[in-house]
Image: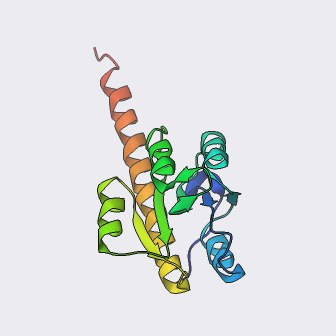
Amino acid sequence: MKCLKRDADSTGTLLVVGLTSDSDAAWKVAMDCFPAAHRAANCSEAVAVMQQRSPAVVICDDSLPDGSWRDVLDTAAALREPPAVVVTSRLANERLWAEVLNLGGYDLLARPLELTELRRSLSGARQQWLNARGRHYLARDVRNRSSISTW
């Protein structure tokens, strides 16, 4: 499955938080799926990038030098257009997967990353963000139309 790339405004960007130990092949998969991608080494950098760039998808290591995936997820959830958050972990199990989903994350991927699974998850996460973004703009349009007085 190949990801469709378009301009960053219409399909969003990717933010990669942590994940320094994974291969260049994983980065290539990410770049195949998104027109632009940004890296952050820790939570502080991730917060700054999310506030400046409003990414569509964030893929985040489960443990970071200055926090965890929960901190990244909380920051993402507070954005006007929250990105879908994919968490990666060497200790991926059913309990962590359930926790990620229950707290609003999109997916949990086991490391080392399997490239087909990475592509599937990033594509699905981006589609979820696009669908939510479309509902947001549709709801705003409906509100604007209903506020227009008719004669």
The front one of 26 and 149 is: 26
The residue shown at (45%, 55%) is: 129
Q: Quadrant of the C terminus?
A: top left
Instruction: Quadrant for residue 74, please give it.
Output: top left
Q: Is residue 75 left or right of residue 24?
A: left
* Percent x, y of residue 89: 49, 71
The residue shown at (68%, 77%) is: 28
Q: How many marks?
A: 0
* Percent x, y of residue 140: 39, 34
On screen, 68 above or below 147?
A: below
Instruction: Quadrant for residue 27, please give it.
Output: bottom right
* Percent x, y of residue 144: 38, 27
The front one of 84 and 133 is: 84
Residue 59 in sight here: no
Residue 97 in sight here: yes
Instruction: Quadrant for residue 146, please give it.
Output: top left
Q: How is the image coloured?
A: rainbow
On screen, 92 above or below 15?
A: below
Q: Residue furthest front?
A: 65
The residue shown at (62%, 72%) is: 30
Q: Is residue 63 left or right of residue 77?
A: right
Q: Is residue 84 left or right of residue 28?
A: left
* Percent x, y of residue 20: 68, 69
The front one of 106 and 60 is: 60
Q: Is residue 95 left or right of residue 22?
A: left
